[in-house]
């Protein structure tokens, strides 16, 4: 058996990205920067041909924006394609050249799998470790992007022999259990919460939509006067109209994306979410994302009303790990990203049964307030 050069441990599995992909944030940055470059070029053409002015600064800005778009679109592919993943007896390692990150297999609290919507059988495997809350609140995770059959790799990390159904993200999660594993409880969330961040994001989307309308209203009269005066050649007029349209479309597109993220996406995610408790694990499926948590990692459960007077309850799974308890982004201790997939059940009807099935201690915030 081969051994890792740093830890001297036997290598259980090694591999790399099946196909390199570009994260959505980089794609959005590339679209915005590319659009800004096209708009700048259009206005540079209008200024140069219509006003006979120097456009060196505009051309420089357009080139800079185009370079940003190209970098956002291609640098992640270049960076990810040469990465290598290694699983040893005790470690999971990501390395690229001299860069190396690792996490102990025994310290992993749970895993999140994000299946690729474009490449079947490929996805990201995110390994998370429970860390203290409070002053030491932070996130310790290791991501293996674009790995083939990430659920099979997760089984290897857990020290199991992967079962035959693993490797197909299109199959229902309940059909990709470990050998002999069975489902004891299942439920779905009945609502999505309007958090302050979600409200602020929706308000931001509305303001951007108003900004798009305002820009369109302010740009239309002067452009119309220029066209009626026939001050520019027909080709230049077309370029001017195209540049102005791109500005409005860019603002409207950003407004639509922000509004979708705040209003529609949380509702769709709630409808696509399913919770499972098996005799070995807690599993959550949300669209193309999955969360896999061994029940041995759960220290206790906190339940709380979804909102005042509601029959639905939130179930927070407080995790335990080496020298750490709980997990900072989990619902029990707050978190910066409410849409992040974390070990909790939101707005479920049968929280009592879920707690009984888990066989762990339960803290009810409602009961605690009544006792006080």
Image (cartoon, grey):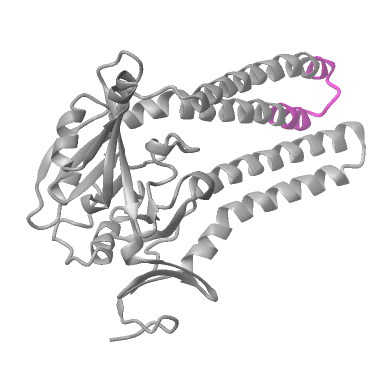
Asked if residue 163 is positioned above or below residue 212 in the image, the reply reads below
Q: Position of residue 211 (x, y in %)?
A: 67, 20
**Seen in the image, is 312 located left or right of residue 47?**
left
Q: Nearer the viewer, residue 65 or 3?
A: 3
* Residue that appears at 31% across and 82% down: 10
Examine the rendering and report whether any part of residue 289 can be seen: no
Q: Nearer the viewer, residue 126 or 282?
A: 282
Q: Position of residue 317 (x, y in %)?
A: 30, 41
Q: In which quadrant of the rendered view does residue 239 lie?
A: top right
The overriding secondary structure of the stretch rendered in magenta is helix
Count of labels shown? 0
* Residue that appears at 75% across and 50% down: 63
Q: Nearer the viewer, residue 35 or 97?
A: 97
- Which quadrant is the N terminus positioned in? bottom left
Q: Position of residue 73 (x, y in %)?
A: 57, 53
- Which quadrant is the C terminus positioned in? top left
* Residue that appears at 41% across and 70% down: 93
Q: In which quadrant of the rendered view does residue 16 lie?
A: bottom left
Asked if residue 356 is positioned above or below residue 27 in the image, the reply reads above
Examine the rendering and report whether any part of residue 371 can be seen: yes
**Seen in the image, is 187 located left or right of residue 368?**
left
Residue 265 lies in the magenta stretch: no
* Residue that appears at 43% across and 56% down: 141
Residue 234 lies in the magenta stretch: yes
Q: What residue range appears in magenta?
A: 225-242
Pick out the residue farthest to the left: 180
Q: Nearer the viewer, residue 238 or 344?
A: 344
Q: Position of residue 138 (x, y in %)?
A: 50, 50
Asked if residue 148 is positioned above or below residue 223 in the image, the reply reads below
């Amino acid at each position: 058996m081969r051994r890792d050069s740093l830890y001297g441990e036997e290598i259980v599995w090694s591999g790399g990205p099946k196909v390199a992909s570009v994260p959505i944030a980089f794609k959005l940055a590339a679209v915005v920067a590319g659009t800004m470059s096209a708009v700048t070029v259009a206005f540079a053409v209008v200024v140069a041909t219509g006003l006979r002015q120097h456009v060196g600064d505009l051309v420089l800005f357009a080139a800079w924006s185009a370079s940003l778009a190209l970098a956002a679109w291609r640098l992640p592919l270049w960076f990810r394609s040469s990465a290598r993943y290694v699983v040893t007896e005790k470690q999971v390692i990501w390395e690229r050249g001299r860069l190396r990150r690792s996490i102990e297999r025994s310290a992993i609290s749970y895993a999140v799998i994000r299946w690729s919507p474009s490449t079947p059988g490929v996805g990201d495997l995110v390994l998370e470790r429970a860390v203290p809350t409070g002053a030491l609140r932070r996130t310790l995770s290791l991501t293996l992007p674009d790995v083939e059959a990430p659920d099979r790799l997760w089984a290897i990390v857990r020290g199991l022999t992967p079962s035959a159904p693993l490797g197909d993200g299109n199959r229902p999660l309940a059909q990709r259990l470990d050998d002999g594993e069975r489902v004891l409880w299942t439920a779905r969330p009945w609502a999505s919460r309007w958090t302050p961040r979600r409200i602020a994001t929706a308000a931001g989307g509305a303001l951007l939509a108003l900004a798009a309308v305002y820009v369109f209203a302010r740009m239309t009269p002067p452009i119309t006067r220029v066209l009626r005066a026939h001050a520019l050649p027909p080709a230049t007029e077309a370029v001017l109209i195209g540049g102005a349209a791109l500005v409005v479309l860019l603002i409207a597109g950003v407004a639509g994306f922000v509004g979708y993220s705040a209003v529609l996406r949380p509702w769709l995610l709630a409808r696509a979410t399913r919770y499972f408790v098996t005799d070995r694990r807690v599993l959550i499926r949300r669209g193309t994302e999955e969360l896999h948590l061994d029940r041995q990692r759960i220290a206790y459960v906190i339940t709380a009303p979804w909102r005042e007077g509601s029959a639905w309850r939130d179930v927070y799974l407080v995790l335990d790990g080496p020298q750490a308890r709980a997990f900072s982004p989990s619902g029990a201790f707050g978190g910066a990203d409410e849409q992040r997939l974390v070990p909790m059940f939101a707005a479920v009807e049968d929280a009592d049964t879920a707690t009984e099935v888990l066989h762990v201690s339960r803290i009810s915030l409602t009961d605690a307030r009544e006792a006080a």
